[in-house]
Image: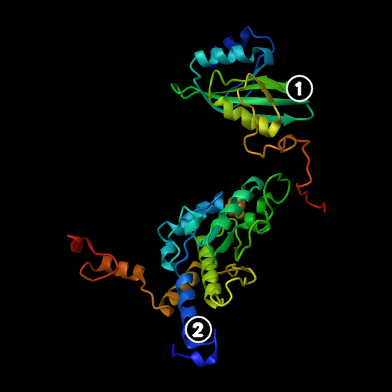
Amino acid sequence: MAVGHAEGPGQNLLLTRLEDVISWARSNSLWPLTFGTSCCAIEMMMASGASHHDLARFGAEVTRPSPRQADLLIVAGTIVKRMAQPLRTLYEQMPEPRYVIATGACVISGGPFIYHSYSSLRGVDDVIPVDVYVPGCPPRPEGLFYGILTLQRMIRERAGLKHPEERRAPVTAALPEGITKQEIQAEMLELFEAQGRRNVHEEYRRTVSDPGAKGAYPGRGERG
Amino acid sequence: MSDWLEDFIAGKEGAELLADDRPRSLLLPLPALIGSMQALKAQGFDMLNDHMAVDNPEGEHIRLLWLLCSTESGELLRVCCDLPRQQPVAPSLNALWPVAEWQEREVYDLFGVLYSGHPDLRRLFLEDDWEGWPLRKDYEDSFILEPGKP
Ligand code: SF4
């Protein structure tokens, strides 16, 4: 209790540091709900499960089939009027703090179904609050990653413990126009290094080219 | 291949082959529908792949389509039947192909076609209190947005 106690409640060093640690942990262990309603969900599966776009690198790959265990709702795909109520229920069943990423034109504005549709919602924010919008039809996996990285930054910057009820204004995480795959890869690499994470892909490539080297994945010989 | 189908419609009044259609399409009059479907099933079209409808306000009819498939030969056959738009009542094919139950509920849900002999004709996709048949061409409601309109 001696640490920084003099400054008064909420101001001491220990609590400030603890908050940083908690939001760092929170932002790096997002558990998304397994929820997808149409084509965008296929792209989300590409991003979370498939090779090349492994979402585990950002600590958000543990998709949960129950909203009670999830804290991130990625709304991927058209939401029709009849789905609105179950979606709201799912959102309300998720424990606080919970975050929502809306991917794709459909859930942002109605997208291709904005006109002449008798059933598609024109924007999921009529039903649940959204933190990050990821535009695209569907967004590329890199676009979704960009959205998740944006959300992680928002979580880290948010004064989570002191004001749990505080909501930040939603942001749009659009990849800048004309950006290339190489630029995205370079930026992600930079990010990995800045956060001191291991680049398992580099290590894997090294193990493959040099079977004797120690790396992220054991070579065939090591496994015996 | 074409012979048996021409023989098949030979005795039926109002039945015709729709030209140049793939898969081959057969237009049947409403009274002959059930009997012909029974005969087609006996001939080897043992699977009902799909059931659809097309609304045609100019022609004042709703065309029902059934896609039949023979699991033995893989042959496909489309059977069509026109219903008057004002009184769209068709016989249910649920007794021949049990899968028709839900397919007919879907067509009922979106086009308002009534099936006589259907065991459980309720809406399938839309809310139970929905008013109107949204896939009919003249359907309107306050939710639908049109370009250029407020
Ligand atoms: S935004 Fe495009 S890709 Fe995504 S669900 Fe809608 S139509 Fe499908």
Is B45 on the left-hand or right-hand side of A129? left
Q: Residue furthest top?
A: B11
Q: Of B135 and A212, which appears nearest the observer? A: B135
Amino acid bearing label 1: Gln
Is A31 on the left-hand or right-hand side of A212? right
Q: Check if mark 2's residue and mark 1's residue have beta carbons within 8 Å.
A: no
Badge 1 density bin: few <14, some 14–19, many ≥20, Cα 10 Å: few
Tell me the SS state at disc 2: helix
Chain letter of mark 1 equals B
Tag 2 and tag 1 share a subunit: no
**Residue at the image point whose x is 45% and y is 64% from the top:** A60
| Residue under pointer 1 | B87
Q: Position of residue B47 (x, y in %)?
A: 50, 23
Q: Which quarter of the figure has residue A212?
A: bottom left
Q: Of A181 and B81, which appears nearest the observer? A: B81
Q: Position of residue A200 (x, y in %)?
A: 34, 69
| Residue under pointer 2 | A16
